[in-house]
Image: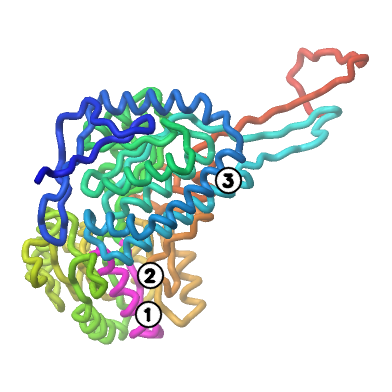
């Protein structure tokens, strides 16, 4: 039986292009190599850009009504194919079906925002700024845009990008992760079914060769990226050097502070889900709990019980709370992180390193791991593990907890669990993090707000989706106009014009 090869989608059709290399797509639950994916050469990116540039000639001049009509139809197709997409994501990523369904819904919310793009694109008008003179502005698309996206949210993160770009009149090239690429091709098919013209949305699969071709290409106007901080810095530096606009979202080490006045059972329940959901493979996962004062021992006791109750199994099993990691390398990284924490003095309260799933012994499974008394000099604290490992640090008071978070190089998301409004308000004002939850462990904003952290979690100053997304994918024109009557004579002035 031959293994399926996933092809590129360029100009409204599947193609192998110039690609001769392939990568492996695993089934993380079984460990099997289930598919191959083409890895693009520079010529494949060139072909996608040429197709997108040609499509932009008409799409960039399309009406708002045409764009929103397609977005409304695309939204309906996403709902019709939700189950198919969720199963496809689960089969390549490993996350449980309901988790995959959740990311589809959160991505679809951005499509819904894009359905109202006409309102978001409204300009402003100032009447009679000078005698007979008006000033107004409007926004126009940039041209060909590209997105480079991670494996952990194979549909949601791309949909934080391409609906915004396309609805504002741009054309788009998506370079998804080669680890779980299939759902991006299904999205391309749904766009075509919704009536999107050929070449407006393209999918090019690949590795660093494809990434560098995108960053170097002179006809790509903007690049959106989500991934690790070192690669975000690389993307930002390389793309801005060629004059591109860049959104570059990096890594995270998200903290959740639990105060003594919090409902410990409630906090532990949400910390467990936030740390171990999707096997910890989320940029907004809570990886460090900060137990303040007397909350510490009680919190760890409840977290231990809840971690041991997490049902680990294949994503397709409706009884599973948490699936496998995405690759063998990811599994080994998590095992090393727990061992490192233990070697450096952390207490291993729950050890998930030797977790076996009956019937899936070759899968990439690890169980939830809970480390107590983690300190800031430990690798388990400093590194972004990206797996089901929750470390607990201790702080004497809220001042020490805030100082600990502010000293961390990352500033993506954070949370506080408390019954005190005063403590919560102080926390949200003083903590140097871009997205904050109050008794909410994963504070991902709705689509009509923008998503983005601070410090090393956001390179540059461009968050993603929402109003910031509209501004990123468009540029403003400001027009100063006068319409003199034909019989009126207005002498031109040689001095710098003033508004008198």
Q: Which mark is residue 441?
A: 2
- Residue under circle 1? 259
Q: Are marks 2 and 1 in contact (CB under 8 Å)?
A: no
Residue 272 falls inside the magenta stretch: yes
Instruction: Give the distance between the C-alpha atoms of the residues marked 2 and 3, in whole angstroms.
Output: 30 Å
Q: Which mark is residue 117?
A: 3
Nearest to the eye among marks 3 and 1: give it.
3
Which quadrant holds residue 413? Answer: bottom left
Main secondary structure type of the part rendered in magenta = helix
Front residue (pair 479, 85): 85
> For numbered disc 2, what is the local secondary structure?
loop
Whether residue 395 is visible to the viewer of this picture, yes or no, is: yes
Q: Earlier in the sequence, mark 2 or mark 1?
A: 1
Measuring 27% from the left and 31% from the top, which residue is drawn there? 15
Q: Which residues are magenta?
A: 254-280
Q: Looking at the picture, does residue 290 appear above or below residue 445?
A: below
> For numbered disc 1, what is the local secondary structure?
loop
Label 1: few (<14), some (14–19) or many (≥20) C-alpha neighbours in 10 Å: many
């Amino acid at each position: 039986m031959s293994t399926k090869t996933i092809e590129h989608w360029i100009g409204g059709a599947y193609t192998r292009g110039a690609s001769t290399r392939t990568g492996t797509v695993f089934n993380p639950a079984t460990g099997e190599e289930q598919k191959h994916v083409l890895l693009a050469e520079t010529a494949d990116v060139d072909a996608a850009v040429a197709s997108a540039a040609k499509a932009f000639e008409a799409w960039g001049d399309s009406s708002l009504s045409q764009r929103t009509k397609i977005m409304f139809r695309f939204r309906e197709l996403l709902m019709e194919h939700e189950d198919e997409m969720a199963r496809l994501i689960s089969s390549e990523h490993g996350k449980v079906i309901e988790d995959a369904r959740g990311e589809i819904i959160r991505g679809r919310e951005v499509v819904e925002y894009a359905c109202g793009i006409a309102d978001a694109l409204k300009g402003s008008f100032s009447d009679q700024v000078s005698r007979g003179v008006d000033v107004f502005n409007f926004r126009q698309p940039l041209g060909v845009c590209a997105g480079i996206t991670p494996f952990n949210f194979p549909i949601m993160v791309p949909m934080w990008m391409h609906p915004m770009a396309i609805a504002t009149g741009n054309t788009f090239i998506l370079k998804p992760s080669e680890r779980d690429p299939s759902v991006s091709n299904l999205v391309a098919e749904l766009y075509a079914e919704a009536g999107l013209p050929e070449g407006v949305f393209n999918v090019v699969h690949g590795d660093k060769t494809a990434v560098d071709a995108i960053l170097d290409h002179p006809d790509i106007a903007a690049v959106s990226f989500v991934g690790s901080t070192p690669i975000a810095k690389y993307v930002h530096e390389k793309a801005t050097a060629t004059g591109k606009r860049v959104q570059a979202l990096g890594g995270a080490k998200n903290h959740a502070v639990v105060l003594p006045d919090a409902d410990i059972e409630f906090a532990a329940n949400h910390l467990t889900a936030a740390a171990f959901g999707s096997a910890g493979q989320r940029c907004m996962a809570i990886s460090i709990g900060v137990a303040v004062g007397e909350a510490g021992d009680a919190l760890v006791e409840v977290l231990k019980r809840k971690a041991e109750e997490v049902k680990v199994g294949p994503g397709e099993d409706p009884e599973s709370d948490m699936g496998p990691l995405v690759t063998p390398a990811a599994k080994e990284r998590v095992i090393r992180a727990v061992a490192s924490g233990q070697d450096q003095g952390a207490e291993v309260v729950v050890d998930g390193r030797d977790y076996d799933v009956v019937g899936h012994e070759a899968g990439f499974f690890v169980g939830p791991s809970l480390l107590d008394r983690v300190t800031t000099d430990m690798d388990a604290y400093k590194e972004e593990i990206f797996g089901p490992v929750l470390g607990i640090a201790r702080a004497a008071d809220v001042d020490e907890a805030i100082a600990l978070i502010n000293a961390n190089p990352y500033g993506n998301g954070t949370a506080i669990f408390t019954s005190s409004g005063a403590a919560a308000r102080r926390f949200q004002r003083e903590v140097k993090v871009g997205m904050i939850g109050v008794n909410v462990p994963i504070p991902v904003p709705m689509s009509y707000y923008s998503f983005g952290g601070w410090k090393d979690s956001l390179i540059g100053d461009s968050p993603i989706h929402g109003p910031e997304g509209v501004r990123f994918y468009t540029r403003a024109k400001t027009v100063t106009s006068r319409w003199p009557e034909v019989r009126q004579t207005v002498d031109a002035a040689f001095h710098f014009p003033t508004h008198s």
